[in-house]
Every structure is written in structure tokens, then in C-alpha cells.
Image (cartoon, rainbow, N blue to C red):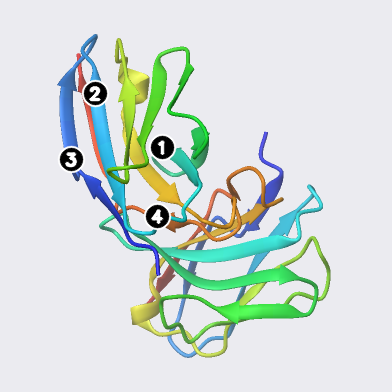
């Protein structure tokens, strides 16, 4: 079955700098890759997703890139702000959004 | 605004008690899921359902059970709670095109 590895497990950056979180997946048939943000005391919230027919997608300060050949995808956050501090999860699925396999999570801390 | 609701948000209960965690969604999604989240952050799938009267066990073995009698409702039951069941439980649903919508979770403590 699918296996998703996420790195790093913790990341600390200065406010205004960029943050990058990376994930690798094992199933070459995977075609859907969402990213989630979980704030303290809340459930994970979908922040951006990408499908296998696209190499990059942007939404304001966040972007996701996908390299199907290498089977990895990354989340990029630019101009980080304190409210970006949270736990981030990547996920992958070869059944659309039906059966997601999640990475282990990255705790991102933005230092003022 | 969340379209998937979990109750209660927090629950402290004694060992041996039977408990039911409620999850309801108003989006008409066929597919619903229960995850257990450990303090180390990881999400572990414990149950899922692809429609009414359809339930499956997930990747993490769990002593809990679920039912899906109505599309919008996916409750999780523990017949006899134990301290090892102390955890955060998250419910989610999807229309299969977009990623999951998660509820806010139930933090369960068994004493």
C-alpha cells in the first residue's frame, strides 16, 4: 500500500522567512496530494491540494510542487507570519480524495 | 464554518464506562472516517465508511465500533473505556474529489 514520509518533524523559522516541508510517497499510481494545517485545539484544515496532472500550484503565500518522477511533493510558505505556526500534514491518494494516507506531520514555529 | 460537527469536545470518563462519540455532517458526503491522533501528532485511521450500512476497520486496530445508519451520522462507540483509549478522536468526510473536511475533534480522557 501507499506510504508517505514527511520531513522535517519540527521546523522553526524567523518571521518573514520561507518555510519548506517535504513529502515522499511510494505508490506511483497516487494522483491527489492535499496539505492540511492543524492549529491548536482544532481539526486539520485543507489549505491547498494538487493533482498529478499539475506540477505546481499557488495560493497567495503558499505553494505546492509535485515531482512525479521522484515521487515527492513539497509545501512552500513565503513571508511567514506568526499565524502560520501550526502542525502541517501532507497526504497522498490514488483514489482521488477517497482514501488518503497521511504523513507524520511537521510542527512549524514562526519566531517573531 | 465547519460543516462537520463532533460532540462532545472534551470528555473525562471512568474506566469501564460505555461512551459514544458523535459525528455529523451536513454536506451529503458518502464517505466518512474516524482517526485517532496521538500526542506525537500522527493521524491513525481506525474506521471508515463509504456509505449507509457500510463500515470498515482502518489501519490501526481499535476496540471501538462504528455504525452508519444515516448518511449524515457516523458515531463511534467504546463499550468499556480504558486508560489506553485516552486520545484525540477526529472525524472527517469527503465527496471523493476534494480532500477531507475534519471536525474539531473529541479529546477523551479515561481515568
Q: Nearer the viewer, mark 3 or mark 2?
A: 2
Q: Can residue A105 be seen in this view?
A: no
Nearer the N terminus, badge 3 or badge 4? 3
- For the residue pair B69 and A101, the one nearer the viewer reads as A101
What residue is shown at x 52% (from left), y 56% (from top)?
A: A94
Task: Specify the subunit that label 2 lies on.
Answer: A
Percent across and percent down for residue B78 are 55, 83
Q: Of B10 and A67, which appears nearest the observer?
A: A67
Q: Mark 1 points at which residue?
A: A39
Q: Name the residue under label 3.
A: A10
Q: How far apart are marks 1 and 3 (CA)?
A: 15 Å
Residue at the image point whose x is 56% and y is 89% from the top? B79
To which chain does the residue with label 4 belong?
A
Disc 3 is placed on an element classified as strand
Residue A69 percent across, percent down from the top left: 32, 42
Q: How far apart are marks 3 and 4 (CA)?
A: 27 Å
Q: Do marks 3 and 4 both belong to one polypeptide chain?
A: yes
Residue drawn at point x = 44 percent, y = 38 percent: A35
Q: How crowded is mark 3: few (under 14 residues within 10 Å), some or many (20 or more)?
A: few
B16 in relation to B2, above or below: below
Which one is earlier in the sequence, the residue at label 1 or at label 3? 3
Say whether residue B52 is visible: yes
The residues tagged by marks 2 and 4 sit, at their Cα atoms, a distance apart of: 26 Å
Mark 4 / mark 1, whichever is N-terminal: 4
Say which of B22 and B95 sits in front.
B95
Are the residues under marks 3 and 2 on the same chain? Answer: yes
Furthest residue in direction front, as rendered: A69
Query: Mark number for residue A28?
Result: 4
Amino acid at each position: 500500500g501507499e506510504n508517505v514520509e514527511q520531513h522535517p518533524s519540527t521546523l522553526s523559522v524567523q518571521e518573514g522567512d520561507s518555510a519548506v516541508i517535504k513529502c515522499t510517497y511510494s505508490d506511483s499510481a497516487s494522483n491527489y496530494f492535499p496539505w492540511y494545517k492543524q492549529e491548536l485545539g482544532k481539526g486539520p484544515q485543507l489549505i491547498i491540494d494538487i493533482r498529478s496532472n499539475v506540477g505546481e500550484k499557488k495560493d497567495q503565500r503558499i505553494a505546492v510542487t509535485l515531482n512525479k518522477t521522484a515521487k515527492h511533493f513539497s509545501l512552500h510558505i513565503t513571508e511567514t507570519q506568526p499565524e502560520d505556526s501550526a502542525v502541517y500534514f501532507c497526504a497522498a491518494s490514488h483514489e482521488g480524495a477517497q482514501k488518503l494516507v497521511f504523513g507524520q506531520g511537521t510542527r512549524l514555529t514562526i519566531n517573531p | 464554518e465547519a460543516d462537520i460537527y463532533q460532540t462532545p469536545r472534551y470528555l473525562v470518563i471512568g474506566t469501564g464506562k460505555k461512551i459514544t462519540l458523535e459525528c455529523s455532517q451536513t454536506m451529503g458526503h458518502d464517505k466518512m472516517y474516524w482517526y485517532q491522533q496521538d500526542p506525537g501528532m500522527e493521524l491513525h485511521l481506525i474506521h471508515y465508511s463509504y456509505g449507509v450500512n457500510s463500515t470498515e476497520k482502518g489501519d490501526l486496530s481499535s476496540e471501538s465500533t462504528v455504525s452508519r445508519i444515516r448518511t449524515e451520522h457516523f458515531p463511534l462507540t467504546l463499550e468499556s473505556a480504558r486508560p489506553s483509549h485516552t486520545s484525540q478522536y477526529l472525524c472527517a468526510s469527503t465527496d471523493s474529489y476534494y480532500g477531507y473536511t475534519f471536525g474539531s475533534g473529541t479529546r477523551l480522557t479515561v481515568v
